Amino acid sequence: MTSRRGYLLATASGVAAAAATGGVQAADMGLPLKAPAPPPPAASWAGWYIGLNAGAAWQHAANESSVGGSKLDYVSPTTSATGFIGGGQIGYNWQDGNFVFGLEGDIDGLTGKGHTLQFSNGDGGGGSGQPKSFSNKISWLSTVRARTGLAVGDTMAYVTGGLAIGGVKDSMNVAFTGLPFTPKSVSQTRVGWVIGGGVEHMLWNSHWTVGLEALFVDLGTSTVTVNPAFTGPLGKTGRFSNQAVIGRLKVNYKF
């Protein structure tokens, strides 16, 4: 029994020695050995992308009215409304190490309409306390923006800013006692600016990204004149600032 055990131990030792010798001989002969698996490629933000966005937009306008060019209202009413915003975007990124630079353009539709009613303080035209109503709406918005970001692996934080173009409708209505008139509204395409920032994250296969973005948009000031033929108390001009604060979710496919 002892001799049999010794025989088995000797055989196992011989096999191990032969395997070790064979490995050394294979290395000496230059035979290929199996290389370790390469590390996964680093996440890259460079290239074209296209996607969709959806979120909320808070529209705001600070309004004032004047009579014959002179402001007589003691309180400047504001209009505001929160609605839905949704649309699409397309862009391109360049990457240098952890720094990402890009250009992005988008177009969105907006819902919501701001409205307010004000009673002025003795501005003529048949007595004091004549009510005036103001309303404003941004119905569509397009931006062209530069983006500058810092990427850490598959997540990037960025700031953005550029040109904003939007469709705006502003309306003013003044109720004079006993005097009929037609309310006035102006619809126009306005050009302004946009600034903001966001965070974007690559999903499992580096082709899909998801992000959150916040923007402030200013489309400048527009004017509406009621009864423009009158230069006295019946001729009133309203001024509207057209602004929006936007928060939205973005999903992109990166080519």
Image: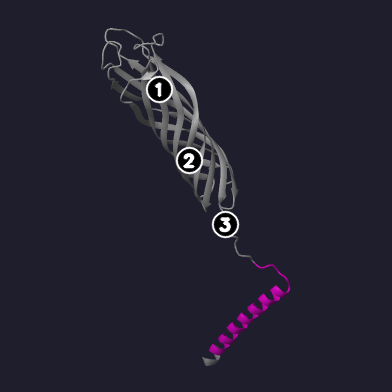
Q: On the picture, is 87 further left or further right than 60?
A: right
- Identity of the amino acid at label 3? Pro
Look at the magenta stretch and give its main secondary structure: helix
> Taking 139 as reference, is 152 above or below it?
below
Looking at the rendering, the stretch of residues picked out in magenta corresponds to: 5-33
x 66%, y 68%: residue:
33
> Taking 126 as reference, is 168 above or below it?
below
Q: Position of residue 235 (x, y in %)?
A: 37, 12
Question: Quadrant location of the C terminus?
Answer: top right
Does the residue at mark 2 contact the one at mark 3 (Cβ under 8 Å)?
no
- Identity of the amino acid at label 2? Val
x 30%, y 7%: residue:
179
Q: Earlier in the sequence, mark 2 or mark 3?
A: 3
Q: CA distance from mark 2 to mark 3?
A: 24 Å
Would you name the residue on which mark 2 appears?
251
Q: Position of residue 120 (x, y in %)?
A: 29, 20
In the rendered structure, find residue 40 and report the number of the disc placed on it: 3
x 30%, y 16%: residue:
123
Judging depth in this view, the residue of 66 and 16 nearest the camera is 66
> Taking 49 as reference, is 189 above or below it?
above
Q: Quadrant of residue 59?
A: top left
SS category of the residue bearing label 3: loop
Judging depth in this view, the residue of 110 and 38 nearest the camera is 110
Q: Earlier in the sequence, mark 1 or mark 2?
A: 1
In the rendered structure, find residue 239 and report the number of the disc placed on it: 1
Nearer the viewer's eye, disc 1 or disc 3? 1
Q: Is residue 13 visible?
A: yes
- Identity of the amino acid at label 1? Arg
Judging depth in this view, the residue of 57 and 233 nearest the camera is 233
Residue density around tag 3, few if under 14, some if 14–19, many if 20 or more, within 10 Å: few
